[in-house]
Image: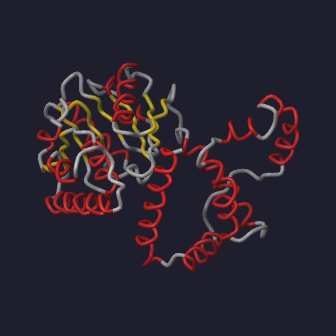
Amino acid sequence: MSPKEGKIGIIGSGLIGRSWAMLFASVGYNVTIYDVISQKVEDALADIKQQMSILEKKNLLRGKLSPEQQLALISGTLNLEDCLRDALYIQECIPENLDLKKELFQKIDMIVNDTTILASSTSTFLPSLFSEGLKHKENVVVAHPVNPPYYVPLVEIVPAPWTKSNVALKTKEIMLEIGQSPVLLNKELPGFALNRIQYVILNECWNLLKEGVLNVEDIDKVMTEGLGMRYAFLGPLETAHLNAEGMANYCERYSNSIYNVCQTMPPPPKFEGSLVKEMNNQLVAKVPLNKLQERRDWRDHCLMGLSQLKKNL
């Protein structure tokens, strides 16, 4: 299989950048990873090699290419221009700092051509905040992955008010090509979609703990052994649709109950104060801080297994 036309540039060699590089290489794209420190680039390439070896042994490597073929498509550089030159698509993966992103996109703007898609992995910043005033602002879009993107396929594609429609659509097409599951928002809004839903869940978890209704373990169990079992295959709206004789019937039956329960919920809390310590202590008792990576590895293995199961079903 020959490499695909068009290069992919990855800016940032951290965990997200590495995962993106593996995804693009899995379908045959040449990928260049850029960072400002040589050791970071070397560590990223070494880690990618190790990850691919483990994935192959577990029969979980994505794509039809061997690990050796995929690794041959990935290179690193300390030169931003080398990363951007002739790139079809750029995926920015630097830390969540708005000033840093603005500065970086201004540099990118002076180098790229008029057709390069400029995507950010940001989970918090609206694309308009770091693209306004750029010559190529119509090519800027957010492509927000779920961590870790190699194991969780959702990607939120969020356009700025001035993003060209064909840029957002092409980004969606590329995400589908590399095996991700994109959703295209019709407009930008704080938190996008995933975090808006996630924050509502976290808020009520806080409330249940604060009111002494459940401890941390049992709150999480409500999701892992209840809602999460369904939500892994059906979204909340289809779940409701199936839990009655259609969604219209569900609303007829439960709209008053939903409204009345929600009326008892307090305003959104700030995650601060003594309850943070209590919550943390309970979680550390389950997963000590020196065991976090071990638990992440277990999570990633489970997520890949679930992804394979869903495909087989």
Please give the name of the residue rendered at 46% of the width and 76% of the height, measured from the top-left corner: 289
Q: Decide which of 307, 110 is in the foreground and name it.
A: 307
Residue pictured at 35% horizontal, 40% vertical: 120
Q: Is residue 125 left or right of residue 221?
A: left
For residue 268, above or below residue 161: below
The extreme front residue here reads: 312
Q: Is residue 153 above or below residue 188?
A: below
- Residue 83 occupies quadrant: top left
Which residue is at 67% across, 64% downward? 221
Compared across the picture, whether 248 is left or right of 102 comes to right
The spot of residue 209 in percent (x, y) is: 72, 67
Looking at the image, residue 165 lies above or below residue 312: above
Q: Position of residue 47 (x, y in %)?
A: 24, 62
Residue 313 picture quarter: top right
16, above or below 291, in the image: above
Q: Residue at x 17, y 53 (%)?
A: 68
Residue sitting at the far top? 165
